[in-house]
């Protein structure tokens, strides 16, 4: 009997302990469940709040895009009646299930667009955008009328480098009456300048048989046969070598391609507009074609400006310039014209990547205009052609050619290259910011 009582007491004790354990577990599970439910509810609310903020931001950005469109619009359609420079923003424009309000204020030469996005539930987001109508530009310095690498320089009878200097890592050989208005620098050791009519000082190791017109000679070893020398200074150091001008060709390739790609060869029709554009084949401007250039052009083949063709930079570029690039050669035929916007500081820079040391760029009789650049090849300029500035590995000026670097005509010493015209309002880098 006693044993039975002890067993019953032990059973009741174990049962009580199990019940206590079960109650502890139940309490823990309940607490954990409550925590999870609270976490899930909080997360859901946070997600909902985030979604609301994103939606308000979308409303504000829609207002920014519309304001930028209206600043650049040529009519008041969908701009509340005002457009262009007079556009000052709009109030409570419905967009989807929300709306936005925009204001436009002048800050110096720029404008600041403030857009407030408002959701259907009344949540708001404010964003500001600074815009400018001045395009980004890069410098291209053609400090010399003629700059030549180590391929050689020939200046034939009656050719002229007008109001500009020459810097070459090659000898210069001039024909009868070949004229150079500015100073000449030859950076190659034992370099020679001979047979030129010079209206500026000459700096070279050897200077022979030049007409100096009272200008000075700075030489290292040889000063013979020169006429009408002002002063002569011997044992002078060889002028330092200078690299040809540089442009960021990859960047310009990208800017051209942003305007679209033409596959294969392309002929620009008379009266057409061209650029920004990438052309995978050749580019032809046919006889008498007059074409307006609206941005950079990259031609993966060759370029031909046929007889009497004209390529004119859009007048809206103002004092800025732009680039036409060929992976192959460039041929400018008789009487072709390549002109800037009409501003004295505006040019079209013609660039060839060709390694042809004779005819990377070939400029024929009476052709005129442009700055020509062939860092890896040669430029040949034929009879009576007139250009603004030339830089190349090798250069040959034929009879009666003129490089006219005169400031009364053009000044290419500091060209501002732009991928687009002035007047188009666009984002200033770093000009986007959330304010509220």
Image (spheres, grey):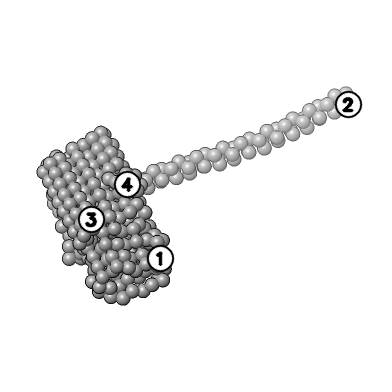
Looking at the rendered structure, the secondary structure element under dot 4 is loop
Query: Taking 89 as reference, is 23 left or right?
Result: right
What residue does disc 1 label? 238
Residue 235 found in image quarter: bottom left
Please tell me which of labels 4 and 1 falls first in the chain: 1
Q: Distance between the residues labelled 3 and 2?
A: 137 Å
Q: In the rendered view, tell whether residue 215 sits above or below residue 159.
A: below
> What residue does disc 2 label?
2
Q: What element does badge 2 sit on?
A: helix
**Residues at marks 3 and 4, CA–CA distance in whole angstroms:** 18 Å
Label 2 Cα neighbours within 10 Å, binned few <14 / some 14-19 / many ≥20: few
From the top left corner, tell me how far across and down residue 179 is, in percent.
22, 63
Q: Which of 156 and 279 is in front in this view?
A: 156
**In the rendered structure, which disc, 1 or 2, sits on the residue that comes first in sequence?**
2
Q: How many labels does the image show?
A: 4
Q: Which of 314 and 2 is in front in this view?
A: 314
Residue that carries the numbered disc 3 in the rendered image: 156
Q: Which of 70 and 126 is in front in this view?
A: 70
What number is the disc on residue 357? 4
Q: The C terminus lies in which quarter of the figure?
A: bottom left
N-terminal label among 3 and 1: 3
Residue 206, horizontal then vertical, whole percent: 36, 64
State which tag comes first along the sequence, 3 or 2: 2
> Of circles 3 and 2, which is in front?
3
Left or right, 221 with respect to 368, comes to: right
Question: Foreground mark, 3 or 1?
Answer: 3
Quadrant housing residue 44: top left
Q: Which of marks 3 and 4 is nearer the N terminus?
A: 3
């Amino acid at each position: 009997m006693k044993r039975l009582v002890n067993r019953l007491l032990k059973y009741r004790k174990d049962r009580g302990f199990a019940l206590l354990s079960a109650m502890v577990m139940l309490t823990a599970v309940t607490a954990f469940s409550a925590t999870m439910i609270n976490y899930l509810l909080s997360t859901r609310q946070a997600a909902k709040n985030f979604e609301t903020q994103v939606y308000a931001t979308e409303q504000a950005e829609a207002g920014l895009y519309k304001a930028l469109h209206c600043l650049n619009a040529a009519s008041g359609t969908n701009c509340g009646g005002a457009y262009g420079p007079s556009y000052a923003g709009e109030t409570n424009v419905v967009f989807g299930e929300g709306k936005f309000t925009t204001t436009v204020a002048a800050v110096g030469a720029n404008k600041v667009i403030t857009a407030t996005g408002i959701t259907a539930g009344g949540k708001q987001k404010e964003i500001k955008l600074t815009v400018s109508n001045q395009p980004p530009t890069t410098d291209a310095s053609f400090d010399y009328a003629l700059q030549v690498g180590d391929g050689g320089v020939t200046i034939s009878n009656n050719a002229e480098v007008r109001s500009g200097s020459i810097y070459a890592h090659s000898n210069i050989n001039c024909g009868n009456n070949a004229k150079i208005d500015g100073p000449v620098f030859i950076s190659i050791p034992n370099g020679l300048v001979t047979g030129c009519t010079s209206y500026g000082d000459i700096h070279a190791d050897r200077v022979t048989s030049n007409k100096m017109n009272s200008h000075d000679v700075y030489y290292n070893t040889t000063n013979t046969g020169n006429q009408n020398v002002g002063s002569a200074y011997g044992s002078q150091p060889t002028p330092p070598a200078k690299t040809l001008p540089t442009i960021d060709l990859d960047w310009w390739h990208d800017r051209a391609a942003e305007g679209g790609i033409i596959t294969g060869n392309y002929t620009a029709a008379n009266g057409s507009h061209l650029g920004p554009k990438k052309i995978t084949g050749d580019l032809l401007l046919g006889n008498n074609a007059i074409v307006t250039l609206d941005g950079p052009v990259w031609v993966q083949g060759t370029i031909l400006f046929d007889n009497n063709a004209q390529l004119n930079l859009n007048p809206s570029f103002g004092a800025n310039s732009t680039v036409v690039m060929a992976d192959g050669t460039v041929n400018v035929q008789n009487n072709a014209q390549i002109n800037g916007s009409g501003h004295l500081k505006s040019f079209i820079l013609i660039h060839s990547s060709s390694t042809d040391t004779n005819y990377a760029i070939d400029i024929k009789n009476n052709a005129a205009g442009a700055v020509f650049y062939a860092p890896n090849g040669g430029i040949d300029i034929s009879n009576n052609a007139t250009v603004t500035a030339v830089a190349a590995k090798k250069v040959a000026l034929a009879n009666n050619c003129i490089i006219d670097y005169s400031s009364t005509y053009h000044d290419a010493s500091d060209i501002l290259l732009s991928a687009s015209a002035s007047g188009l309002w666009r984002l200033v880098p770093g000009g986007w910011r959330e304010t509220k």
